Amino acid sequence: MVLKAVLLDFNGVVINDEALHQQLIEDLLLAENLRPTLSDYAQLCRGRTDQACITSLWERQGRVITPPQLDQLLARKADLYHQAIAAMASLPLYPGLEDLIYQIRASQLKLAIVSGARHQEIQTVLTRSGLVAAVNLIISGDQVSLAGSKPAPDSYLLAIQGLNQQFPDLLLQPQDCVAIEDSFAGIEAARRAGVPVVGVAHSYPYHMLHRRADWVVDYLYDIKLEWLQPYYDLSFSPPPEDLPADQ
């Protein structure tokens, strides 16, 4: 078993924009005469696709949303997100992102973004931040069905399939990857796909991730891929002490 690829979540790991997404979703609810609640957003939206989020929120409030209505709401949110990002003087990227990408490139690993965000949103941020060339593959929320949203494993399985198609000699298996996630839904999706997970305590406290992920760190900049390498090289169960494990 060899570490060959890093599968990186986007919102809450690459960019600190969860508050923006929540505000945009709340604005959509209010425009439809629905009342947003913080607990509903955390439970139904964090780590999931906008499609799954909006559908679940409408159902929670006893409303049925038709496919045309859903498409309109998704398009409206995407436009508002793009406008908000364009208006920012600088993007709220998480500290440690550049170093992590440097580690990935220095180790000659493949890098895929595996996110519930829309492709347009991911592409906008990567382009503006100059990170497009560092990413081999993007799997976005547009590419999975409503039922395939995290915590379903679909997006991670698509990422592995996509990297294998792009690099036929890679022969990538789930156990050859490491996922980096900040949400319960994302961690569950990776583990259901058979991918070991580093949980980053950006959105939830460390102790809440400790029993869900294989390893947990407080911040993105705490991740050192060399700490993980013995797990992949030797295939032993307990990971290094530097990254506390779910044991």
Image (spheres, rainbow, N blue to C red):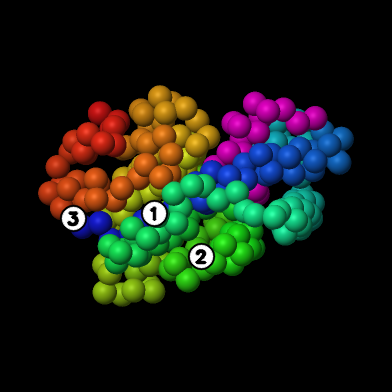
Residue at which label 3 appears: 1
Residue at which label 2 appears: 131
What residue sits 27% from the left and 69% below the top?
170
Q: Give the Cα distance between marks 1 and 2.
A: 12 Å
Viewer-side residue, 146 vs 121? 121
- Residue 195 vs 56, above or below: the answer is below
What residue sits 38% from the left and 67% below the top?
163
Residue 93 location in percent, x, y? Answer: 55, 50
Give the residue type that dot 2 points to. Leu
Residue that sits furthest to the front in the current view: 89
- Per the rendered image, the range of residues in magenta is 35-53
Residue 114 in sight from this viewpoint: yes
- Helix, strand or loop at mark 3: loop
How dense is the environment of label 1, judged by Cα within 10 Å: few (below 14), some, or many (20 and up)?
A: some
Tell me the mark number nearer the camera, choosing from 3 and 1: 1
Viewer-side residue, 7 vs 89? 89
Viewer-side residue, 186 vs 127? 127
Residue 76 location in percent, x, y? Answer: 78, 54
Pointer 1 or 2: first along the chain: 1
Residue at which label 1 appears: 100
How dense is the environment of label 3, judged by Cα within 10 Å: few (below 14), some, or many (20 and up)?
A: few
